[in-house]
Image (spheres, grey):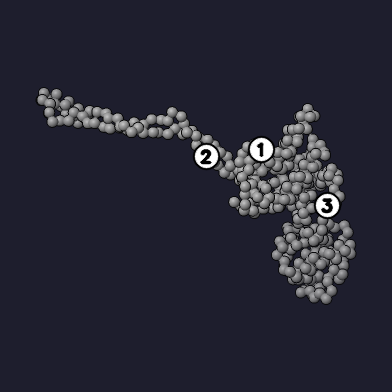
């Protein structure tokens, strides 16, 4: 076996809460494969040892006798009157034999049931103590949140540990706040944003918004709800150029010198507070465009905006702000591949 979550190769057999047999990964403990056993009734045929002899008339003898009687002739004494056939006698078993067959398929459903089992059991106990109907609604909300996180994570190709942490954040938030009249998908997406930022994964809010098919303002609203309910110590919107810059350079296929120059420009801009009103993504895009101009890399503004998710107007504004202090942005003893008078006409 090969675990799709952690790429482990060792598995063990276990049983879920619903009584189905599954194969778990020995490394991460997630369900890899699920098996469903079905019973079938089989009636077996059994042959007796003693054959059954039956004498049947011969068709030729009946036809010849019919012609002889019509012609008025005598019967032939040497004509056969019939033949003997030996049949084996078959009988069904008095009771059927039960045979089992097993079907194996993906363990995503069993993993979902096991993930939601503790939540559903806790909600059912609280519902029985409070004597209201909030228990089943909590289970449905958790199911919707889990599916939303799984869908967005698969689009963004996020690690499964981040997905599990995002669902845990959603459960912690749902236990402290009321989910009535709340956008469950937006809250689940906000939990995924927090988990991605805690793991220092280079994913922008624009990418997550496009993958979740939700507006950024809606996600930002529930990011505040999540931060207030969980009382997060670190700022939930923490971002850095060091997180996004390497991924942008890789997607643009820049060489090492251009990447180092862009990273240096971004660090100088942040340390000297040249663009205080700009976010790290805008500064990263402008620094990459400036480095491409100096290193003679043919990258258009449209290509950079497609990767970073900015508009060309925003890129040009931040780029002009960098040009106002471009002498301080370059590293010492740096010789550009393109003279400044040609790079910045």
**Residue 209 to residue 132: above or below:** below
Q: Give the mark, 3 or 1, whose residue is nearer the N terminus.
A: 1
The residue to which callout 3 is attached is 237
Identify the mark at residue 79; answer none if there is no mark.
none
309 lies left or right of 93: right
Name which residue lies at 86% across and 64% down.
Answer: 269
Q: Residue 253: horizontal and vertical position, in percent?
A: 70, 65
User: Distance from label 3 to label 1 (Cα)?
Assistant: 39 Å
Disc 3 residue crowd, few under 14, some 14–19, many 20+, Cα 10 Å: some
Quarter of the figure with residue 240: bottom right
Identify the mark at residue 101; answer none if there is no mark.
2
Q: Residue 80: horizontal and vertical position, in percent?
A: 17, 30
Identify the mark at residue 17; answer none if there is no mark.
1
Q: Marks 2 and 1: CB-CB under 8 Å? A: no
Q: Secondary structure at mark 2?
A: strand
In front of the other: label 3 or label 1? 1
Q: Marks 3 and 1: CB-CB under 8 Å? A: no
User: Distance from label 2 to label 1 (Cα)?
Assistant: 21 Å
Name which residue lies at 61% across and 39% down.
Answer: 20
Quarter of the figure with residue 295: bottom right
Name which residue lies at 74% across and 38% down.
Answer: 119
Q: Marks 2 and 3: CB-CB under 8 Å? A: no
Q: Which quadrant of the figure contains the C terminus?
A: bottom right
Name which residue lies at 78% across and 56% down.
Answer: 200
In front of the other: label 2 or label 3? 2
Disc 1 residue crowd, few under 14, some 14–19, many 20+, Cα 10 Å: few
């Amino acid at each position: 076996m090969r675990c799709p979550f952690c790429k482990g190769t060792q598995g063990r057999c276990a049983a879920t809460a619903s009584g189905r047999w599954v194969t778990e990964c020995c490394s991460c403990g997630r369900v890899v494969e699920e098996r469903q056993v079905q019973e079938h009734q089989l009636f077996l045929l059994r042959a007796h040892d003693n054959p059954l002899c039956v004498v049947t008339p011969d068709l030729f003898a009946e036809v010849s006798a019919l012609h002889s009687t019509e012609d008025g002739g005598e019967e032939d004494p040497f004509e056969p009157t019939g033949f003997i056939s030996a049949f084996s006698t078959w009988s069904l078993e008095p009771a059927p034999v039960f045979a089992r067959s097993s079907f194996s398929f993906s363990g995503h459903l069993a993993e979902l049931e096991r993930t939601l089992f503790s939540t559903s059991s806790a909600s059912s106990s609280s519902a029985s103590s409070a004597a209201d109907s909030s228990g089943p609604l909590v289970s449905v909300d958790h199911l919707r949140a889990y599916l939303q996180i799984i869908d967005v994570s698969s689009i963004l190709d996020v690690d499964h540990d981040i997905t599990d942490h995002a669902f845990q954040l959603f459960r912690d938030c749902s236990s402290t706040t009321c989910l009535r009249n709340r956008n469950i998908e937006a809250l689940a997406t906000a939990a995924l944003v927090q988990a991605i930022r805690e793991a220092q994964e280079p994913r922008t809010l624009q990418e997550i918004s496009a993958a979740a098919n939700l507006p950024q303002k809606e996600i930002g609203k529930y990011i505040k709800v999540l931060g207030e309910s969980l009382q997060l110590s670190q700022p939930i919107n923490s971002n850095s150029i060091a997180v996004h810059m390497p991924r942008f350079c890789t997607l643009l296929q820049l060489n090492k010198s251009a990447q180092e120059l862009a990273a240096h420009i971004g660090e100088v801009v942040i340390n000297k507070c040249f663009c205080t009103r700009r976010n790290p993504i805008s500064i990263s895009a402008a620094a990459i465009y400036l480095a491409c101009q100096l290193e003679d890399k043919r990258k258009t503004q449209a290509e950079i905006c497609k990767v970073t998710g900015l508009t060309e107007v925003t890129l040009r504004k931040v780029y002009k702000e960098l040009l106002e202090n471009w002498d301080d942005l370059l590293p010492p003893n740096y010789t550009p591949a393109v003279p400044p008078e040609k790079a910045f006409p």
